[in-house]
């Protein structure tokens, strides 16, 4: 008996692509936000822009998670 419910993913290619984009935005945004802290300490120019872009990427990923939670495979079938 498994503790967590197993998620096998979706069979719809559009939802699969959306899920991939979501996690790329979230992890990429977090990575750029962390790297901006190191760039600031090194004195590099543009560390604020890197931080802002990272925060926007994470926010876009969260919004897409909310959008994905509303979608079902039947909604995207053509």
Image: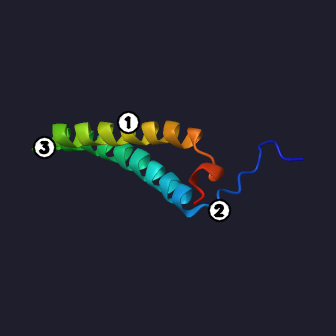
Residue 59, numbered label: 1
User: Foreground: 16 or 26?
Assistant: 16
User: Disc 2 on helix, strand or loop?
Assistant: loop
Quick check: 40 left or right of 34? left
Asked whether disc 1 touches disc 2, contact meaning CB atoms under 8 Å apart, the reply is no
Determine which residue is flagged by label 3: 46
Residue 11, numbered label: 2
Q: Within 10 angstroms of label 3, few (less than 14), some, or many (20 or more) residues?
A: few
Image location of residue 18, percent across then percent down: 49, 53
Image location of residue 3, percent across then percent down: 81, 42
Residue 21, numbered label: none
User: Disc 1 on helix, strand or loop?
Assistant: helix
Marks 3 and 2 sit apart, C-alpha to C-alpha, by 41 Å
Q: Within 10 angstroms of label 1, few (less than 14), some, or many (20 or more) residues?
A: some
The mark nearer the N terminus, 1 or 3, is: 3
| Residue in view at x 38 percent, y 42 percent | 30
The mark nearer the N terminus, 3 or 2, is: 2
| Residue in view at x 22 percent, y 43 percent | 50
User: Disc 3 on helix, strand or loop?
Assistant: loop
Q: How is the image coloured?
A: rainbow
| Residue in view at x 44 percent, y 54 percent | 21
> To which quarter of the image does residue 34 belong?
top left
Of tags 1 and 2, the one toward the viewer is: 2
Of tags 3 and 2, the one toward the viewer is: 2
Image location of residue 74, percent across then percent down: 65, 51
Q: Quadrant of the C terminus?
A: bottom right
């Amino acid at each position: 008996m498994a503790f967590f419910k197993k998620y096998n993913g979706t069979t719809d290619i559009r939802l699969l692509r959306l899920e991939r984009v979501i996690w790329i935005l979230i992890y990429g945004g977090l990575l750029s936000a962390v790297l901006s802290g190191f760039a600031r300490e090194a004195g590099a120019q543009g560390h604020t822009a890197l931080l802002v872009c990272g925060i926007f990427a994470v926010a876009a990923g969260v919004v897409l998670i909310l959008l994905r939670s509303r979608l079902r495979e039947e909604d995207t079938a053509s």
